Image (spheres, helix red, strand yellow):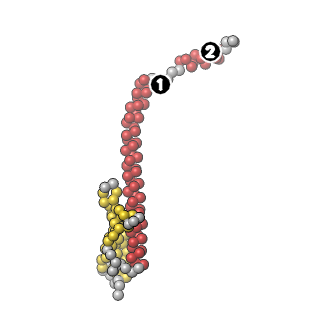
Amino acid sequence: MKWSPSKAKFTRLRSTESGFTFAEVLAAMVFMAILIPVVMQGLSLANRASVFAERKRMAAFLAHGKLNEVIATQAWSASATRGDFAPEYPTYQWQLIQTAWAQDDMQELTCVVTFPVQGKSHQIQLSTLVEDAP
């Protein structure tokens, strides 16, 4: 076998290289022990915010549909004033509030949709004006 200085140099450099030291591994583990809980808490907060936003969007969609339904059928003056959106959305409750409008012969219809998010009750309100029934 023929000796080559380039192979000897490579072997010598390779033998001086080593893995991570105990202090480096320990520092990386401490860094990860601090970082992982913070990242998990951030992800949990982002998840809760997205759940709330999605349920609020659905509540607004349902309130809009309920207002359109009672206006289109002109049942806003004689229909039920509360209920739920069962069977599709049984946790969403609605209430229709009718108040006189100060100007003209108008009524203000407000649909209040209540929905739970993580054990707390939240609500949104959508309002519109309708012509008072003769």
Q: Quadrant of the N terminus?
A: top right
- Which quadrant would residue 96 be assigned to in this image? bottom left
Q: Secondary structure at mark 2?
A: helix
Q: Residues within 10 Å of mark 1 (few under 14, many from 20)?
A: few
The quadrant in which the C terminus is found is: bottom left
Residue 80 in picture, x, y percent from top left: 32, 75
Residue in the picture at 40% in, 27% down: 26
Q: Amino acid at mark 1?
A: Phe
Q: Position of residue 78 (x, y in %)?
A: 33, 80
Image quadrant where residue 71 sits? bottom left
In this view, 119 is above or below 7: below
Looking at numbered disc 2 in the image, what kind of residue is underneath it?
A: Ala
> SS class of the residue under badge 1?
loop
Residue that carries the numbered disc 1 in the rendered image:
20
View extreme (bottom): residue = 134
Which of the numbered marks, if any, corresponds to residue 8?
Answer: 2
Residue 13 vertical placement versus 111 (above, below): above
- Which residue is more in the foreground, 57 or 78? 78
Q: How many circles with numbers are drawn on the protein?
A: 2
In space, the residues marked 2 and 1 are separated at their CA atoms by: 24 Å
- Name of the residue lying farthest toward the front: 87
Which of 49/85 is in front? Answer: 85
Image coordinates of residue 99 in percent, x first then y, are 30, 77
